[in-house]
Amino acid sequence: MEELPSSPEIEKQVLGAMLLNKKACIIGVTNLTKDVFFHWRNRALFQAAVDLVNSGSPVDIISISEAAKKHVDKDSFDVDYVVDVSTSVGTSTNIEYHCQILNDFYIRRRLIQVGESLAKKSADSTVDINDVAGEVSNAVI
């Protein structure tokens, strides 16, 4: 099976921009959800950033590292990854564009998942085809 559409580099770019610049952080939190992040560490970092922003706390390397541990196994997450993310970005200028790319990848993954589910149900003769057709209508973006 092919790998689902994603870009760990762009995920890191967005997270790094969010760490670098408060305005970029607000843009990221406003335009994305944790589900947009395919890679578990990045998903945990993003959710930690959301938690920090919502609580009025600063989003920096130490605070986001500690907050991320609430969303994953503490032993599997370390500050070195956050440092790597923060140093992998040169600028926060293109964050809106990168957010759109991540949203597009997420929509593509969801369409693949929905399509696979509908294909299985369509092939199952014990499932009412009218129910499957209804699911198709509800799945359209």
Image: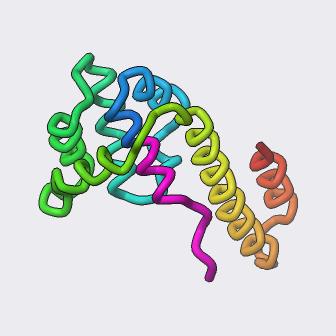
Q: How many numbered circles are shown?
A: 0
User: Which range of residues does the magenta coloring cover?
Assistant: 1-14
* Residue at the extreme front: 90
* In the foreground, 106 or 131: 106
Q: Does the magenta stretch include residue 13?
A: yes
Figure quadrant of residue 47 = top left
Which color scheme did the rendering employ for the protein?
rainbow
* In the foreground, 75 or 22: 22
Q: Residue at x 58, y 32 (%)?
A: 96
Q: In this view, does 9 lie to the left or right of 117?
A: left
Figure quadrant of residue 138 = top right
Q: Residue at x 74, y 65 (%)?
A: 115
Q: Quadrant of the C terminus?
A: top right
Q: Residue at x 53, y 35 (%)?
A: 95
Query: Does 44 appear above or below 122?
Result: above
Percent across and percent down for residue 70 are 20, 44
* In the foreground, 6 or 86: 86
* Residue at the extreme top: 56
Percent across and percent down for residue 41 are 33, 56
Q: Does the magenta stretch include residue 132?
A: no
Q: Quadrant of the N terminus?
A: bottom right
Figure quadrant of residue 5 = bottom right
Query: Does 44 appear above or below 132?
Result: above
Query: Does 58 appear above or below 32?
Result: above
Q: Residue at x 52, y 47 (%)?
A: 36
Query: Does 82 appear above or below 109?
Result: above
Q: In this view, does 3 lie to the left or right of 63?
A: right
Q: In this view, does 63 lie to the left or right of 130?
A: left
Percent across and percent down for residue 4 are 59, 68
* Residue at the extreme bottom: 1
